[in-house]
């Protein structure tokens, strides 16, 4: 890449320090920051003044800005050598419900000055839609069934176009359910305590998971090893149906297994959001992640990840 396009290329070697910008620095973003080498300067975009102190205490340089207010993002131009974009699209109620203006605003600012060497975007496995239990590889065509999946497809398209047009090595991570015992709401414990039903075995669907720590490691691997404009499934090796996942967690926690209900009566007992997840069944293939990103999972199965206790776990 020419020196005028590479934030490091025009500087003396003693100043060539990697600067990683994390956009959407929630739980996973903080894990990404923690896993970065000490010599890397970590910057996080935040729209909350209240988070500035917390980020600084964690050794992260906070930068105030709002993806919904593009003018506030001007300081991002030419700032980072690499970018991890984990911010979700707008939620329900946006007038252009199928678009992700946040990703467009971010990439527009990144193009104003020297470009990053690589960008990683955290998407969702929901873009595959219902695969009826079939194996989903990255070459499978998206089949969005929900507004949130349409918005993610729009973001993926925007990121890939940016990568090709600006010659930035951009990677898209398709992420399933994220879990961890030290993550808020990161285990099925609350649902198990509420006795929330799951589908009967005959009606059950396959579900996919990734431990939050392994997801953070995948983000870093893609930053440095991802191929240009490449899509990666980021999931563990488990191939569990949803009811079996909750049964497994119940057994690990010493709690009663959840009741099973047929799909015909599930609408009367379950919230719409949960029903939407129960309407899609797929088994994600992670071979490309292992082969190209050379990522060895720390928690290859849900059983191994849920069993691990941490000091902050509830």
Image (cartoon, rainbow, N blue to C red):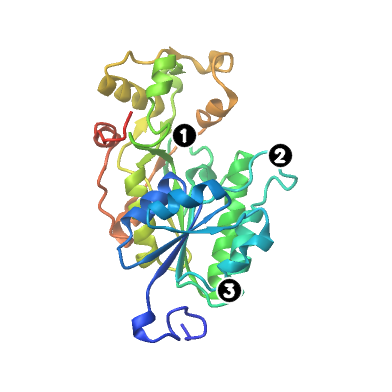
Q: How many neighbours does mark 3 have within 10 angstroms: few (below 14), some (14-19), or many (20 or more)?
A: few
Report which residue position mark 2 lands on. Answer: 93
Q: How many neighbours does mark 1 have within 10 angstroms: few (below 14), some (14-19), or many (20 or more)?
A: many
Residue 2: x %, y % from top left: 48, 86
Q: CA distance from mark 2 to mark 1?
A: 27 Å
Residue 113: x %, y % from top left: 58, 77
Report which residue position mark 1 lands on. Answer: 281
Q: Measuring 46% from the left and 50% from the top, which residue is drawn there?
A: 53
Q: Measuring 42% from the left and 55% from the top, which residue is drawn there?
A: 56
Mark in the foreground, 2 or 1: 2
Report which residue position mark 3 lands on. Answer: 165
Among numbered discs 3 and 2, the one appearing first in the sequence: 2
Q: CA distance from mark 3 to mark 2?
A: 31 Å
Q: Are marks 3 and 2 in contact (CB under 8 Å)?
A: no
Q: Measuring 36% from the left and 59% from the top, which residue is drawn there?
A: 220
Q: Is residue 66 above or below residue 8?
A: above
Q: Are marks 3 and 1 in contact (CB under 8 Å)?
A: no
State which quadrant residue 293 falls in: bottom left
Residue 141: x %, y % from top left: 53, 51
Q: Are marks 2 and 1 in contact (CB under 8 Å)?
A: no
Instruction: Tell me if 255 is positioned left or right of 64 in this view.
Output: left
Mark in the foreground, 3 or 1: 3
């Amino acid at each position: 890449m020419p020196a005028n396009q590479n934030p490091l290329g025009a500087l003396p070697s003693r100043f060539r320090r990697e600067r990683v910008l994390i956009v959407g620095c929630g739980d996973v973003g903080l894990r990404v920051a923690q896993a970065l080498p000490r010599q890397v300067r970590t910057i996080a975009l935040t729209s909350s003044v209240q988070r500035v102190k917390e980020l600084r205490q964690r050794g992260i340089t906070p930068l105030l800005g709002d993806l919904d207010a593009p003018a506030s993002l001007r300081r991002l131009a030419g700032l980072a050598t690499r970018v991890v974009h984990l911010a979700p699209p707008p939620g329900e109620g946006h007038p252009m419900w199928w678009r992700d203006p946040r990703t467009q605003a971010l990439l527009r600012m990144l193009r104003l000055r020297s470009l990053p060497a690589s960008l990683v975007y955290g998407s969702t496995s929901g873009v595959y839609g219902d695969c009826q239990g079939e194996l989903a590889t990255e070459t499978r065509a998206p089949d969005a069934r929900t507004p949130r999946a349409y918005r993610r497809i729009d973001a993926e398209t925007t990121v890939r176009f940016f990568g090709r047009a600006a010659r930035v090595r951009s990677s898209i991570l398709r992420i399933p359910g994220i879990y961890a015992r030290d993550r808020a709401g990161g285990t099925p414990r609350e649902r198990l305590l509420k006795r929330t039903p799951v589908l009967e075995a005959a009606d059950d669907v396959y579900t996919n998971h990734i431990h939050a720590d392994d997801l953070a490691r995948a983000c870093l691997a893609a930053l440095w090893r991802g191929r240009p404009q490449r899509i990666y499934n980021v999931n563990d090796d488990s191939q569990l149906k949803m009811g079996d996942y909750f049964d497994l967690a119940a057994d690990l926690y010493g709690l009663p297994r959840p009741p099973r209900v047929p799909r015909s009566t599930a609408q009367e007992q379950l919230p719409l959001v949960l029903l939407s997840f129960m309407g899609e069944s797929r088994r994600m293939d992670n071979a490309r992640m292992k082969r190209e990103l050379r990522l060895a999972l720390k928690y290859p199965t849900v059983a191994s990840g849920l069993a691990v206790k941490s000091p902050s776990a509830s």
